[in-house]
Amino acid sequence: MKRVITFIMGIALAIPTFAQYQTNRERSRYNRDDTERYYGLRLGMNIASTSSESTNFDTNPRTGLVIGGVFGMQLSRQHPVWLEMGLMYSEKGGKTHLNDAKVTYRLGYLQLPIMAKYNFNVDDDLFISPFLGGYFAVGITGKVKNYETRESVSVFDSMKRFDGGLRGGCCLEYKMMYVELGYDLGLANIARDEFDAAHTRSLFANLGINF
């Protein structure tokens, strides 16, 4: 799987970089009269957990895949303020021990992030952009696995499919290359038990391209 992801990412980065290199050298993200919008591809990882007062749902971090696409548009010609939204597949969850047995929660979400960005032009081809916004997500896959009994059941028997919260971080763009680091703070209660509350937490790091 790692080799496949690395290969796909290499191809995705190489093709548009060579095809649009000269055009990209001449563009400015501060005053892009001819390119007021962009599209992007993202691939990365989450370091995710769930937070709860209940030992059933309070978990330690586990890693998961992030992959998807984004669309961005400039909100003002006079200021480098951008709105970015996307559609991502994002793996979250966590791991814990219940009665000395290792248990993992694997949550796969279809996630819609919506963020405002402000671009700082460091150099002609280099931009740093802090971002702040939120996200909405719906669970499409999920399993709870007990490694002692080898049992695996649907996580949505004990957790709700809907999640939503705040998202913040910072990204760096050099020419068409893109890297970002951020944090998803889940605000929605994903626990089905009316006496317990559980929230997702996720540190994410993504690579990608904008074109």
Image (cartoon, rainbow, N blue to C red):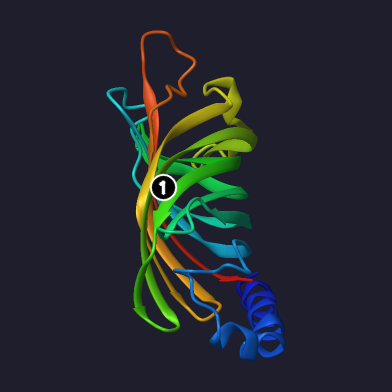
Please give the name of the residue rendered at 38% of the width and 25% of the height, measured from the top-left corner.
198
Q: Is residue 125 left or right of residue 54?
A: right
In the displayed structure, would residue 170 be above or below residue 158?
Answer: below
Which of the 4 image quadrants contains residue 134?
top left
Amino acid carrying mark 1 in the image: Ala
Counting from the top left corner in percent of width and height, residue 32 is at: 54, 69
Can residue 109 be seen? no
In-front residue for pair 54/126: 126
In the picture, which quadrant includes the N terminus?
bottom right
In-front residue for pair 199/167: 167
Toward the top, the furthest residue is: 194
In the displayed structure, would residue 6 be above or below residue 106?
Answer: below
Q: How many marks?
A: 1
In the picture, which quadrant includes the C terminus?
bottom right
Can residue 35 be seen? yes
Please give the name of the residue rendered at 45% of the width and 70% of the height, measured from the top-left corner.
179
Please give the name of the residue rendered at 36% of the width and 48% of the height, measured from the top-left corner.
168
Which of the 4 image quadrants contains residue 39?
bottom right
Counting from the top left corner in percent of width and height, residue 118 is at: 37, 57
In the displayed structure, would residue 35 be above or below residue 138?
Answer: below
Counting from the top left corner in percent of width and height, residue 40 is at: 62, 64
In-front residue for pair 72/1: 72
In-front residue for pair 45/151: 45
Q: Is residue 195 left or right of residue 10?
A: left
Counting from the top left corner in percent of width and height, residue 8 is at: 69, 75
Q: Is residue 181 left or right of residue 33?
A: left
Which of the 4 image quadrants contains residue 182?
bottom left
Numbered disc 1: secondary structure = strand
In the displayed structure, would residue 180 be above or below residue 115?
Answer: below
- The local crowd at label 1, few if under 14, some if 14 to 19, many if 20 or more residues have their Cα within 10 Å, is many
User: Residue under circle 1?
Assistant: 48
